[in-house]
Amino acid sequence: MKRSAFPFFVFFLLTFTLNAHASLLGIRLGKQENHTRIVFDLSEKVPVESVNDGGLRVILSAGRNSNFKNPREVGIIKEIEVDQDSLRRTKVLFKSSFAVKILKSFWIAPSSSSSHYRYVLDIAKGEDLPNPVLPSFAKKLKIVIIDAGHGGQDPGAVGYRETLEKNVTLAVAKKLAATLNESGHYKAILLRKRDVFMSLASRLKKARALKGDVFISLHADSHPRPDTRGLGVYTLSSVASDKEAERLAQKENKADLIMGIDLKDELPEVSNILIDLTKRETMNLSTKLAQSLVKNLGKYAFLLRNPHRFAGFVVLRSTDLPSVLIELGYISNKKDEELLLSEEYQDKICHGILEGIEAYFHR
Ligand SMILES: [Zn+2]
């Protein structure tokens, strides 16, 4: 048994190793008399998948060569998107205003005229589409809305060395957006990108309009006791989990008072403290997201004793958007403040959040 399995193991290992180094050198399109020819130039023969669902998607188990240039649209192809997935495969989407049919596909081995492999796809116009469906890779990305707490005239909490909460939240928010976008699975949208004031009501309105998949509000707390430290993840509840969470929610909800904004005028439904039972599903999802974040952030950050807490945070009141608020730490604590100002620690936290979001979506 062992003897016969061994060569297969070597074969798989070899295939994997080869594919890991395979590269896509280029893609060429040419218009022929009755069809459009697409040629993929590759360093090796690699697995190719193609899906034809209103646009032709081709996935090649190869990374793009450094000299790779995006191909130009020819024939029935009106737009081309090239992307890479988390497995370092290259995904190419050929968009057409027609349904596309594949006439044939074949490999051409290296020869005296060409030193690399070529994968050829001959395509032609299929049935007309009544409403051209132009699916995009971008649309398949989950949208994460990131809310950097406070800003402008509202500095938020003030730290041990007078660090302002609004600056910490913005720095981490920007880093988190970059981390999520780089993963290739998410499209991160920042509610504020600069040091500007935004009312809680306008944050809620904007978040709802963006139709995101999850909402993450970033904050950093302060405490009269300088030794209080740790990260906590909060979700919405009409009843607070503890006195501390209640105190925190009251403090965070005061952001609007600075500009004299009355929430009741801005967003009538927000004034209703009782949360409708129909919103339970969103609340359940928020809880799952919070638990997943706590579990993954715990690998990188010092957590509060009960790291998942809940209270009546206004900014988490979207009815259809799973929402959490992360208090990254206490900037009134010397150690937490120091960590939150270091890029290295900010990177760690962002990775923890990314892992938490990944676990949430693959639950
Ligand atoms: Zn805050």
Image: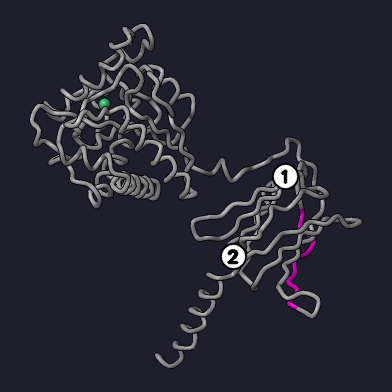
Mark 2 packing: few (<14 Cα in 10 Å), some, or many (20+)?
A: many
Across and down, in percent, residue 217 comes to 33, 31
Q: Is residue 21 left or right of residue 360?
A: right
Residue range (magenta): 101-110
| Quarter residue 309 falls in | top left
Identify which amino acid the numbered label 2 is placed on.
Answer: Ala
Ligand 1 sits in which quadrant?
Answer: top left
Q: Is residue 95 left or right of residue 242?
A: right
Can residue 307 be seen? no
Name the N-terminal-most of marks 1 and 2: 2
Magenta run includes residue 108: yes
Magenta run includes residue 320: no
The residue at which mark 1 appears reads as 79
In the rendered image, the residue lying farthest to the front is 161
Q: Is residue 99 above or below residue 194?
A: below
The residue at which mark 2 appears reads as 62
